[in-house]
Amino acid sequence: MPVHRGADLFETAERRWRGLVEARPDLVPAIELQRRLLAIVADVSRELDEAGVPGLSLSSEYLAAKLTRGMPALAGEPIPLPMPVLGPPLLQFCTTLGEGGAGDAAAHIETALSTGEIASASLLAACLARDQGAVRAGAVQHGLAPDLVWLVAELAAGPLIHLLQQQLLAAATGEALPSALQAWNRGYCPACGSWPALAEVAGGHRTLRCSFCAGAWELTTYACIYCAESGEAFVTAAPNEDRKDRRVEVCGACGAYLKAIDLPELSPYPLLSISDLETTDLDVAAMEHGYARPMLKDFSRVGAAGSPGRAGPEAGVGKPGDG
């Protein structure tokens, strides 16, 4: 994946936003909100780079063994949280989302985080563990919008999980780990276990792009990424006959869908969300026909060794000591 930094990154983003405004003027408010959110994400990424966040001490052999068992590399691993870097952006994202249309719902989350009613570290830990159940339960308990709480946590934790994914997998050396990655034929991300936001097709390669860490991987078979259906129930279609470069893969077996878009090159981090925004009409088309995106797979109760185990106390999102 090409590396974009600083001015080049924002040049690429602005070029894509300009093209999107021309094609979809109705998305101007969403684009402006995305521009502000990605500016914060970029700042957090830069701070993490400058802070020199220590990587996880996980051997290539250990990670390869996990992948061979179908376990994402980071599933069940204790991830140190650099709260001085990640804590303040949680509040920034709330403010920005509130000004961008989320209103009181975002303000209530910001208050809960500021007062400690929701523990920031616990929220981020649950998000990194992909424990949607814990986040939703904590949000409902405190009268907050669950989906918005999850979004705020993902925005803040995204730069860290991307950095870890790059350290552990993108720069994989030796034989065992690259071979395990090459053999990975599952629809969820080999790094964090999330579903892809969409497939980006560049240079003839259908590359799945993780919605959380922006990881990129290819499947060895062409089938539904959720249930592996490859028969007549799995169909790829272009809702707009004039735009064959934008397609949706739908599965009649499991009722799920995946967007696919042709691009000159894969989107650099953190610009994958632009591809997602560019294809919102594909989401609408799929959902109008009864298809939906499934919940994340639950790896939160799996220990680091890959066997079932209790999640640590960091999996909750309430005050320290809450059950």
Image: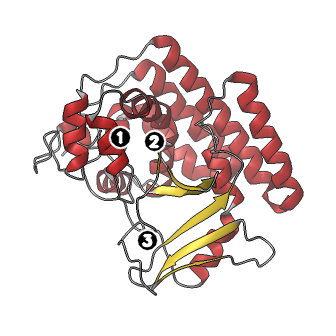
Examine the image and state in which quarter residue 237 appears.
Answer: bottom right
Count all numbered tags in the image, as a single digit: 3
Question: Is tag 1's residue or tag 2's residue first in the polypeptide sequence?
Answer: 1
Q: Position of residue 80 (x, y in %)?
A: 30, 25
* N-term-proximal mark, 3 vs 2: 2
Mark earlier in primary sequence (3, 1): 1
Residue 70: assigned label? none
Question: Residue 53's spot in the image, x, y percent?
Answer: 40, 17
Q: CA distance from mark 3 to mark 2?
A: 31 Å
In this image, 178 relative to 308: left or right? Answer: right
Judged from the image, the secondary structure of the residue bearing numbered disc 2 is helix
Query: Which label belongs to residue 153?
Result: 2
The picture places residue 119, in percent across and down from the top left corner, at 34, 35
Q: Amino acid at mark 2?
A: Ala
Q: Amino acid at mark 3?
A: Ala
* Residue drawn at 26 percent across, 46 percent down: 67
Category of crowding for the residue at label 2, using alpha-carbon neighbours closer than 10 angstroms: few (below 14), some (14–19), many (at least 20):
many
Seen at 43% across and 71% down, the residue is 224
Mark 3 in CB contact with mark 2 (< 8 angstroms): no
Q: Residue at x 66, y 29 (%)?
A: 4
Q: Residue at x 38, y 77 (%)?
A: 229
Q: Nearer the viewer, mark 3 or mark 2?
A: 3
Q: Which residue is most to the right? A: 22
- Residue type at tag 1: Leu
Residue at mark 3: 223
Q: Residues within 10 Å of mark 3 (few under 14, many from 20)?
A: some
1 vs 2, front mark? 1
**Residue 128 image label:** 1
Residue 81 in view in this figure: yes
